[in-house]
Image (cartoon, rainbow, N blue to C red):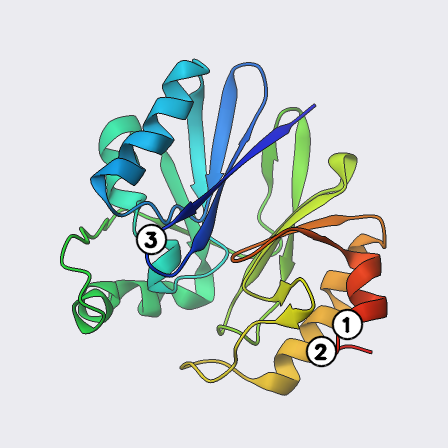
Amino acid sequence: MIQIKSFTFNDFQENTYIIYNEKDCIVVDPGNYQESENLEIKDFIEVHNLKLNYVLLTHCHIDHILGLKYLHDNYKMDVYIPEGELEMYKSSENIAIMYGLNLYNHLDSVQPIKSNTKLNFSNSQIEILNVPGHSPDHLAYFFRGSKVCFSGDVLFKNSIGRTDLPGGNYDTLINSINNNLFTVGDDTLIYPGHGPSTLISDEKNENPFLI
């Protein structure tokens, strides 16, 4: 049985998640930036005596990758990023400078993945959904047995991800939500990249962008 710890990090109020069981954990979208945030996530891992197996990125926007180098320096784990966003990731140092994120340190050693990549955690396979539109090769991570999905910046409570950034497209995003993300089931809890969690059923019935 997995458990989930959420943090809200950096000036973008980005959600970082630790998914863990009795001994192991993975991190989704590490946005830790300030030293206090680095210590917060490190303390949680060490207090619970967890082994960090790997890190997953839903997409490569700067607010979701700020903590990669810190975690890798401390835990030497693998980092998986969407295959189609490798070039975007390589430009992260320039993007960080643009936003005044002078503490950003870039991690070169990452591994590209796509929707048919096989990843497991806690004796279960993680289903990887391709949900572009907010970014060109955005991925979501679905834990079917626990009925939870980490959707990054595709779907929010009563809202959707912005599409005015490079690689974004409104029609593509709506199609991704309706035809890919909504297939996970109405009773699935969505853990988004910003803001509170929400149920698929609630977004089908109440989200003004989707009804």
Image x and y of residue 186, in percent:
85, 55
Q: Residues within 10 Å of mark 3 (few under 14, many from 20)?
A: some
- Given residues 1 and 198, the one toward you in this image is 198
Q: Position of residue 39 (x, y in %)?
A: 28, 30
Vertical placement of residue 114 versus 9, above or below: below
**Side of 137 where 33 appears, left or right:** left
Residue with the mark numbered 2: 175
- Kindly report the distance in space between the C-alpha atoms of the residues bearing marks 2 and 3: 30 Å
The quadrant of the image that shows the N terminus is top right
Label 1: which secondary element: helix
Where residue 86 sits, quadrant-wise, is: bottom left
Judged from the image, the secondary structure of the residue bearing numbered disc 2 is: helix
Residue found 57% across the figure and 14% down from its top: 22
Gap in Å between the C-alphas at discs 1 and 2? 5 Å
Residue at x 53%, y 65% (from the top left corner): 138
Q: Earlier in the sequence, mark 2 or mark 3?
A: 3
Q: For this rendering, which residue is in front, 122 or 71?
A: 71
* Mark 1 and mark 3: Cα distance apart in space: 30 Å
Q: Are marks 1 and 2 in contact (CB under 8 Å)?
A: yes
Q: Please, what secondary structure does the residue beneath circle 3 have? A: loop
Disc 2 residue type (three-letter):
Asn
Q: Of discs 2 and 3, which sits in the foreground?
A: 3
In this view, the mark in front (1 or 3): 3
User: Which is nearer the N-term, disc 1 or disc 3?
Assistant: 3
Is 105 on the left-hand or right-hand side of 129?
Answer: left
Q: Amino acid at mark 3?
A: Asn
Residue 178: numbered disc: 1
Q: Any mark on residue 10, and which?
A: 3
Within-10-Å neighbours for mark 2: few <14, some 14–19, many 20+: some
Mark number, residue 27: none
- Expressed as whole percent of the image width and height from the top left, the position of residue 144 reads 76, 41
Name which residue type carries label 1. Asn
